[in-house]
Amino acid sequence: MISNSMKKNIQGGSVIRKMFEEGIRLRKQFGADQVYDFSLGNPDLEPPQEVLEAIRNLTAGEPNGLHAYMSNPGYPEVRALIAEKQALKSGLTVKADSVCMTVGAAGAMNVILKTILDPNDEVIILAPYFVDYLNYVQNHGGKPVIVQSDPDTLLPVIENIVHAITPRTKALIINSPNNPSGVIYSEAILAQIDQALRNSGQTIYVVSDEPYSDLAYDGQTTPSTLKFIEHSIVCTSWSKTMSLPGERIGYLCISPRCEDFDAMVVAVGQCNRMLGFINAPALFQRVVLHSIDAKVNIGRYESRRNRIYDILSAAGFDVQKPAGGLYFFVRCPIKDDFEFVASCVEARILVVPGSGFGFPGFFRLCFAVPDTMIENSVNAFMEIGRRYHLI
């Protein structure tokens, strides 16, 4: 018999998964070209040529140990290269032992939370949030503490964070560019978070989930968390930057300024093993080594973002253009976001209610979708706008 906690998890389910299943039903009924599915954050661009060439070159000859075990934290040369990149971005002296290769950013977050949490330690999570953060914290005996962001800017409210800190607070999870809102935390915001945590009089780690860090638009960049936050751990992957979500390749990087740094770098390697990952995929560690600066065509995502912004604006929605990431987070024209999303389904538009991200009254829309689907959805969005008297 499965555990009671998993029974509750299954009953609650994922609103994203439910929309995925709804999409299957609608496509069978109306045809794929008549369904406008913006629900999943699944990059649709193929990996860059440098990545594909690295895969071909690495697999062309004799394996020569290409698929063998390595030390739990990963290949030393890969870790050293990543440390060099993080040092350049942060201005800190970051060495290879700061880096542990992981099974995606999710693996990185579970490894670091396993490393730092004792039972009933509290972890502050900023809403709107990626829903699996709750699971990651609970996986390791922690208690999620939800803190609301500003409903107008969707940025953190420092006072709310301060009020949520207790003697049991062990960590704060941040995500910039944010899923689902697309906001980027500025240097000033990161510095304010750091100061607020310092003022608490206790060590509170900041776990920074950064798989969208290279997806910034309008000439913006994502500031370095390591540079501005003392006790920070970066968790990231190449799922979005290199369009490799199914390969599950990522890493965590511990700030050299972290308390208990020496013990932590040993512990994360052990946790990688204890959690059953053992090590990150061997082949794709090598792929990253040979193509680390490769990126998908970010301009394609930016042009799609711009087009959807124009469509939503024309349909009368209260919408802000996301600074980064792959999502719009839009205020619903009615209070009940589940009711609104159900209404969108009637128009064969699939989006995700904000309640699934701990932020009711909004909906999330992913723009990592084909251009043809975006154009085909125009009339459906206009229909929704007229239905709710937005236009």
Image: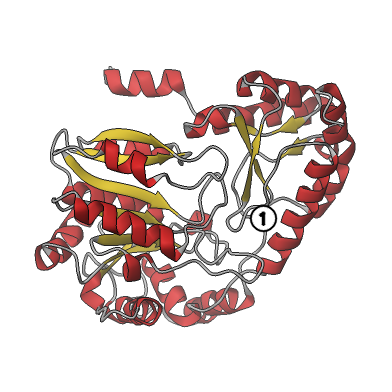
Q: Nearer the viewer, residue 223 or 241?
A: 223
What residue appears at the point 42 percent right and 57 percent down from the top-left corner?
Answer: 189
What residue appears at the point 66 percent right and 38 percent down from the top-left corner?
Answer: 330
Answer with left or right where residue 332 lies relative to residue 287.
right
User: What's the residue type where badge 1 is placed?
Assistant: Asp
Whole-percent x and y of residue 89?
40, 77
Whole-percent x and y of residue 83?
32, 77
Q: Is residue 293 above or below residue 72?
A: below
Name the outermost residue toward the right.
379
Whole-percent x and y of residue 263?
9, 63
Q: Residues within 10 Å of mark 1 (few under 14, many from 20)?
A: few
Whole-percent x and y of residue 94?
27, 78
Q: Secondary structure at mark 1?
A: loop
User: Where, by quadrant of the figure, is residue 363 drawn?
Assistant: top right
User: Where, by quadrant of the figure, is residue 5 drawn?
Assistant: top left
Q: Nearer the viewer, residue 324 or 199?
A: 199
What residue appears at the point 80 percent right and 37 percent down from the top-left corner?
Answer: 32
What quarter of the picture does the C terminus occupy? top right
Q: How many marks?
A: 1
Answer with left or right where residue 39 lies relative to residue 377.
left
What quarter of the picture does the N terminus occupy? top left
User: Where, by quadrant of the figure, is residue 148 drawn?
Assistant: top left
Q: Which residue is mark 1?
A: 44
Question: Does the image show residue 286?
Answer: yes
Q: Is residue 149 above or below residue 265?
A: above
Q: Nearer the viewer, residue 221 or 22?
A: 221
Question: Does the image show residue 70?
Answer: no
Q: Nearer the viewer, residue 385 or 350?
A: 385
The colour mode here is secondary structure
